[in-house]
Image (cartoon, rainbow, N blue to C red):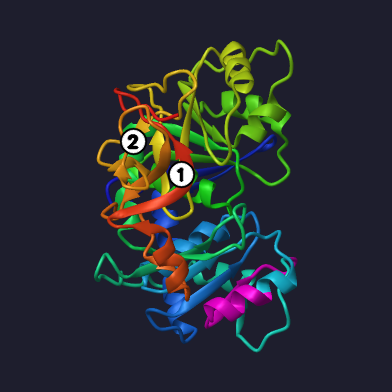
C-alpha cells in the first residue's frame, strides 16, 4: 500500500460493472477496523468469532483483527446456530462479528454488526502489533471430512509459508490480475484469492455474490484476468461440451479444494488453450504439493513439493524408498504448519511421528519428486 497506494488491490466483479478498492483505501479500512476493535474493548490475544457473509467486510475484518494482535476465527456462513454454539464453547471468543442474516445462537457475548464494522473503516489507523512470529494469529476449522471438525491454530509465520506457492504453484507476479471464483468468506479465497495477490502487489478480482459460473468467462475477459482460481466443481459448472472461451490475457488456471479430474482438466485446456495447475494441502498446512508452469505435474500425479518444503512418504519405520507407498508427511519445521488443535493436545500429538506431521493420505514419490 505504501509503494503503490493508487493501484487497484481489489475489484468486485458484476455484469453491470465493478467496485474497486485501491491499495490505499484497503489499507486504511483494515487499520481503521483494527482501531475500532480495540476501542470496543478488545485486547491483543482476544479471540474474535467471524459470522460474516460473502462481502468485502470479511477480509477487512480478518486482517484488521490480525493487524492489532487479535485472533480472528473465520467460519462458514452455512453453519447452523447449534454448530456455531459448539464453536463458541470451544474457542471462547470475546466478541462476535455478525452480519444480520448469518446464523448465530443466543449469547451474552457482545456482537458487532456490519454497520458498526463499516463505520470503523474511517477511524485513524491502528499501529501494527509486532511480536513473536510463532504467536497465535488465527483459528480455522477443518472441513470434517475425516471426522469431527477441529479448531486449527495458526501462527503469524504462516504468511511466510505462502511465499512458497508464488512460484511453486501460481507463477504469480505483481502485474497479475488473479480472479478467484470463491466467496470472500472461504479460506481458499482468503489466501489464494486475496492475501497472496496483495502480498505481491497484484490485483485481486472477486465475483460479486450472485454471479453464476456461466457468467465467469465474460467477466474474466472483460477484466483482463491473467490467472483464474476455483474449486474443481466451479470448473465443471463453467464447462459444457465443445465450449470455447476467448481469454487472450489468461495464462493458466489454478485448482484446489478437491481432486481435479482429468476430464475437467482437458475440457478447460480445449476451451481456453491454457492448462490448470492443481495443488494439494489441508487446513493444517495450506497447500504444499503442486504443479506449476515451471514444473508441471506429470500425468496422474499431484506434482512436487514446493521449493522450500520438506515432504516425505512415511512407512512404519520412517521414510520409505522411492516409488513405495506410505503416508504423505510434512516436516514439523514448515512455517505453514499449524501450532496445534485448540484444546486437543492428544489429537495434536497423534498427528505427529517424530519430526513429521502425518496428513493421513497415502502416496508414493518417484525419482523426480512427483507424488501420486
Which type of secondary structure does the marked residue at label 2 adopt?
Answer: strand
Q: Is residue 64 left or right of residue 119?
A: left
Which of the image's four quarters has the C terminus? Answer: top left
Q: Which mark is residue 305?
A: 2
Residue located at (32% from left, 41% from top): 312
Q: Can you see residue 225?
A: yes
Give coordinates of residue 364: x percent, y percent: 40, 32
Give coordinates of residue 295: x percent, y percent: 34, 22
Mark 2 to mark 1: distance in Å?
Answer: 11 Å
Q: Is residue 103 left or right of residue 334?
A: right
Give coordinates of residue 280: x percent, y percent: 46, 39
Q: Can you see residue 113?
A: no
Report if the CB atoms under discs 2 and 1 are less than 8 Å apart: no
Q: Residue furthest bottom?
A: 108
**Chain part drawn in magenta:** 85-101
Q: Is residue 300 left or right of residue 218?
A: left
Residue 312 against residue 112 in the figure, above or below: above
Which type of secondary structure does the marked residue at label 1 adopt?
Answer: strand
Residue position marked by numbered label 1 in the rendering = 281
Foreground pick, 249 / 25:
249
Foreground pick, 200 / 340:
340
Characterize the local packing of mark 2: few (<14), some (14-19) or many (20 or more) Cα atoms within 10 angstroms. Answer: many
Q: Is residue 290 magenta?
A: no
Residue located at (48% from left, 63% from top): 62
Q: Quadrant of residue 365?
A: top left
Amino acid at each position: 500500500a505504501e509503494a503503490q497506494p493508487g493501484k487497484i488491490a481489489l475489484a468486485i466483479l458484476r455484469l453491470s460493472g465493478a467496485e474497486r478498492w485501491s491499495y490505499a483505501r484497503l489499507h486504511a479500512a483494515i487499520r481503521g477496523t483494527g482501531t475500532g476493535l480495540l476501542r470496543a474493548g478488545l485486547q491483543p490475544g482476544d479471540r474474535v468469532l467471524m459470522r460474516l457473509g460473502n462481502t468485502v467486510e470479511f477480509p477487512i475484518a480478518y486482517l484488521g483483527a490480525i493487524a492489532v494482535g487479535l485472533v480472528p476465527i473465520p467460519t462458514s456462513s452455512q453453519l447452523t446456530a447449534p454448530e456455531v454454539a459448539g464453536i463458541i464453547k470451544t474457542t471462547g471468543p470475546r466478541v462476535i462479528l455478525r452480519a444480520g442474516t448469518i446464523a448465530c445462537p443466543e449469547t451474552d457475548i457482545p456482537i458487532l454488526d456490519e454497520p458498526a464494522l463499516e463505520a470503523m473503516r474511517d477511524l485513524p489507523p491502528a499501529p501494527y502489533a509486532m511480536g513473536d512470529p510463532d504467536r497465535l494469529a488465527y483459528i480455522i476449522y477443518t472441513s470434517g471430512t475425516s471426522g469431527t471438525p477441529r479448531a486449527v491454530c495458526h501462527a503469524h509465520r504462516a504468511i511466510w509459508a505462502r511465499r512458497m506457492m508464488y512460484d511453486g504453484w501460481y507463477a504469480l507476479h505483481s502485474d497479475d490480475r488473479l480472479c478467484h471464483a470463491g466467496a470472500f468468506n472461504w479460506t481458499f479465497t482468503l489466501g489464494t484469492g486475496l492475501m497472496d495477490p496483495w502480498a505481491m502487489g497484484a490485483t485481486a478480482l472477486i465475483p460479486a455474490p450472485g454471479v453464476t459460473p456461466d457468467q465467469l468467462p465474460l467477466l474474466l475477459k472483460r477484466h483482463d484476468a491473467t490467472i483464474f482460481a476455483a474449486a474443481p466443481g466451479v470448473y465443471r459448472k463453467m464447462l459444457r461440451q465443445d465450449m470455447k472461451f476467448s481469454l487472450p490475457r489468461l495464462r493458466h488456471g489454478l485448482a484446489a479444494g478437491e481432486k481435479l479430474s482429468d476430464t475437467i482438466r482437458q475440457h478447460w485446456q480445449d476451451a481456453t488453450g491454457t492448462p490448470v495447475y492443481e495443488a494439494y494441502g489441508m487446513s493444517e498446512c495450506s497447500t504444499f504439493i503442486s504443479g506449476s508452469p515451471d514444473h508441471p505435474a506429470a500425468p496422474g500425479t499431484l506434482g512436487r513439493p514446493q521449493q522450500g518444503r520438506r515432504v516425505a512418504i512415511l512407512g512404519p519405520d520412517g521414510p520409505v524408498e522411492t516409488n513405495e507407498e506410505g503416508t504423505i508427511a510434512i516436516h514439523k519445521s514448515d512455517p505453514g504448519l499449524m501450532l496445534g488443535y485448540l484444546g486437543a493436545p492428544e489429537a495434536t500429538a497423534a498427528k505427529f511421528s517424530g519430526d513429521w506431521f502425518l496428513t493421513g493420505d497415502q502416496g508414493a514419490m518417484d525419482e523426480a519428486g512427483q507424488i501420486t
